[in-house]
Image (cartoon, grey):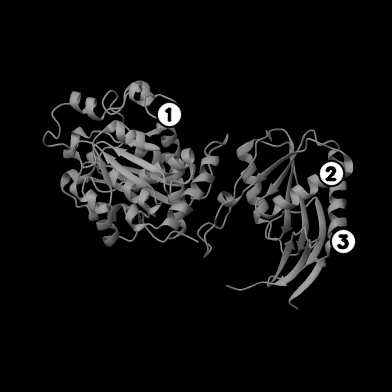
Amino acid sequence: MSLSVDNLLGIKYLNQKDLQLIFETADKFKEIINRPIKKVPTLRDITIANLFFENSTRTKLSFELAQKRLSADVVNFSASQSSVKKGETLVDTVNNILAMKVDMVVLRHSSVGAGVFLSKHTKTTIINAGDGTHEHPTQALLDSYTMIENIGDIGGKNILIVGDITHSRVALSNILALKLQGANIKICGPNTLIPKYLTNLGLEIEFDIKKALNWCDVANVLRVQNERMDVNYFPSIREYRKLFGIDKEMLNSLDKKIVLMHPGPINRGVELTSDVADSDQSVILNQVENGVAVRMAVMYLLAQNK
Amino acid sequence: MNKKTILNYKELDLTLRRLACELVENHQDFTDTVLIGIQPRGVYLLYKLVSIIQNDYNIENISTGELDITFFRDDFGRRDELLKANSTEINIEVEGKKVVFVDDVLYSGRSIRSALSAIQSFGRPSNIELLVLIDRRFSRELPIQPDYSGRKVDSIDTQRVEVEWNDEKQKNAVYLTKKVLK
């Protein structure tokens, strides 16, 4: 059994068996990255280019670490220091890099569908590391993996996504991944930051954060993406914090102990207060650790599909 | 020839007891020894041997581990089917220990080569030995030989050695069969 796809462009192209295979493989890699020597020679004859046309810290670091743990050769590219500034097109940039015998491309781009576009014009394996506000499949995979690790099979479980849905590629990928696994999903956030199409996906929307938290087993809290907002979507950060922020008092007042997740970087004091982000209910750092294992699994499986 | 029995239930039992005896002879109380089963099929053999050593020689606390070699194989990208990994369970220190790899069939020697690389992630053993139930002679692709071997078998490439474990029905046995070509 192998993956049903040759590229990882989005969760919408995957099926349930793919997710299962990725998670099973990630289990094995998680054991490996906790060994005294955390490296395996599997991808030693594979070269991977990380093409980041948009800023990234943890995703880029996580991918690079995963590649190095698999012994792949890695080349890094960031748009700010490249010929993109001189007017080179995306396809030209990538084809030039591929001419140097690169086997796989990890692509982050601000344009929606950049990965799909590139897959139609090049012959390499592409992993989407975030395309605009569209999808961020590896983040969704590591989120689901972390949920399973904490609450077991997520089919039938209640998962809440809180915050800025409109500007979040993490949200859409998460929703698609959770739906594939049969989870119950609820969305909570300011009306202005919840796109209308979400109701077409059959999702429930809740505006009362406390009610929503009482309903869920896991709350995945998203970052307010100020940098993507060209207009004011809510009156003030203070109001957002008051209506949708989670603090220790609220957490303690819930009927049950829920699991809290956040894809990072956290706006401390906005989405989550510091004591909540650092509490024993928060699995944020587990998400980061699992990110390396899941990305190792994705690259391992895709490299075999070549 | 469809299926030829190499070892029947009784013979296999005798062979396992002999292998256990040889291990005890060389490792006495197993204080500095770690027995490592190679996933997937070496693991079952490992626990059979451990149970014989415990029951027949009253030796307890034998250190064991399970090693998966998938990510250390040398045929990545050269096979049609997916290389799917099994779990590795090594919760003991192997640094400076005497390690014995346990596997059911030794064929090309490539799995053991991979295991030699994989074990290094857990430390540097003082020495490594190899125990196999079946040694398929004349089929080695690498200079690897067993230290303990249950039965030596002469076979050709189109044949396959199958080890079946079925304790409940007392049907443990080793067979020589025809390889199914995919």
Closer to the camera in the image, A239 or A284: A239
Give how far apart the Cα atoms at labels 2 and 3 are: 18 Å
* Residue identified by numbered label 2: B53
The quarter of the picture where the C terminus of chain A appears is: bottom left
On screen, residue A201 versus residue B10, left or right, reads left
Same chain for labels 2 and 3? Say yes or no.
yes
- x then y, percent, for residue B56: 88, 44
Q: In the structure shown, which secondary structural element does the residue marked by tag 1 occupy?
A: loop
* Residue identified by numbered label 3: B10
On screen, residue A39 versus residue A96, left or right, reads right
- x then y, percent, for residue B33: 77, 37
Give the amino acid at mark 2.
Answer: Ile
Q: Nearer the viewer, mark 2 or mark 1?
A: 1
Q: Residue at x 26, y 36 (%)?
A: A163
Tag of residue A281: 1
Give the amino acid at mark 1.
Answer: Gln
The extreme left residue here reads A231
Which badge, 2 or 3, is on the more N-terminal residue? Answer: 3
Q: Looking at the image, can residue A40 be seen?
A: yes
Q: Nearer the viewer, mark 1 or mark 3?
A: 1
Q: Chain of mark 3?
A: B
Same chain for labels 1 and 3? Say yes or no.
no
- x then y, percent, for residue A111: 21, 48
Q: Chain of mark 1?
A: A
